[in-house]
Image (tube, grey):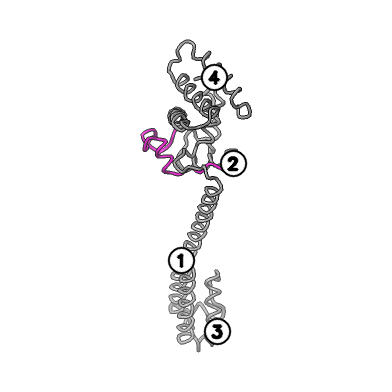
Amino acid sequence: GPMIGALFILIVLTCFYAIMGVYTFGQRAPEAFGRFDIAFLKMLQVTAGDTWVDGVDQWEDDGSLNYSFCIFLITYIMVSCWLVLQVTTAVLLDSFVKASTDIEIEELAKRQEKDPAHDSSKDPLEPLLLSLSIAYRDNDDLSQRLWELFEILDADRSGTIDSEEFCASVRKLNFDPPIHFSDTDFDDMTREGELLDAEGCLNRQTFETAMRERLHRFALNRLADSIGQGHEQAAMTQVFALKAALCCLNPPIEGTRCACSIMKLSLLKLHPSEV
């Protein structure tokens, strides 16, 4: 693979400089370049961070700098340590990231195989949206819960949330399995960036707007999926949709709070374990 290729290049480069050192400095510094094996080990020491090769004087007999060996050593450090080793490290990190991504994909595929009802078209935020749909009582309560959620997701306390922070924070929420939210999902949630500021972030207000739209879509999808479901599941889904429709009126009409309270009682009867 790429890692083996990068290491091979480093070894070939070290051998080349070791051979060149034997022919160039073998007689002047036999302790360091008298034989190929010794020269190879000395060059490896330089690769490991040794700043000079023992056995080679920095100065000529006339007191001038040993330019030939300095150029030899500097070029080796620049090529091997500054170029090849950096490329090798980058390739190694890329391999780790790729392996980690492959593992996550395999785990997701296994979960999908174990869950025949899993639908890849479902909203990745569905567990969170379901929890919010059950929990909020009215329009004001929903706003409060969304603000509290914003505080949780704003890990760096900057007052804004970008795509990377949102995806990482939402995955840490207490859901099993964890929520996997991608940059593409974030673009969809923010209307392809329309809700984002100049720095590509959501503030409190735009976050609430995006989440309300997500909840509205979730209620509509659940209502559409309720066709063909059992009576209890379909009734609960219809309550979600009606609740969302009433509580999203702005300003709330008279009687909305009462209607939401009635639907809350309906939820308790339909699914008390989740409310």
Task: Tell me the kind of residue under disc 1.
Answer: Trp
Q: Is residue 60 above or below residue 259?
A: below
Along the polypeptide, which appears first: circle 3 or circle 1? Answer: 3
Residue contact at pointers 1 and 4, CB within 8 angstroms: no
Q: Which residue does the numbered mark 1 point to in the structure image?
A: 82
Work out how far the residue at label 3 is from the one at label 2, CA to CA, in angstroms: 57 Å
For mark 1, give the secondary structure.
helix
Along the polypeptide, which appears first: circle 3 or circle 2? Answer: 3
Task: Tell me the kind of residue under disc 2.
Answer: Asp
Task: Tell me the kind of residue under disc 4.
Answer: Met
Q: Main secondary structure of the magenta part?
A: loop
Residue 199 position, x and y percent, is: 40, 38
Q: Which residue does the numbered mark 4 point to in the structure image?
A: 263
Residue contact at pointers 3 and 1, CB within 8 angstroms: no
Residue contact at pointers 2 and 1, CB within 8 angstroms: no
Task: State the mark number for residue 176.
Answer: 2
The residue carrying pointer 1 sits among few (fewer than 14), some (14 to 19) or many (20 or more) residues within 10 Å by Cα, namely few
**Which residues, given as a range, are shown in magenta?**
175-202
Instruction: Give the residue at the far top of this rendering.
Output: 254
- Which of 152 and 86 lies nearest the eye of the viewer? 152
Instruction: Give the residue at the far right of this rendering.
Output: 273
Task: Tell me the kind of residue under disc 3.
Answer: Asp
Q: Which residue does the numbered mark 3 point to in the structure image?
A: 37
For mark 3, give the secondary structure.
helix
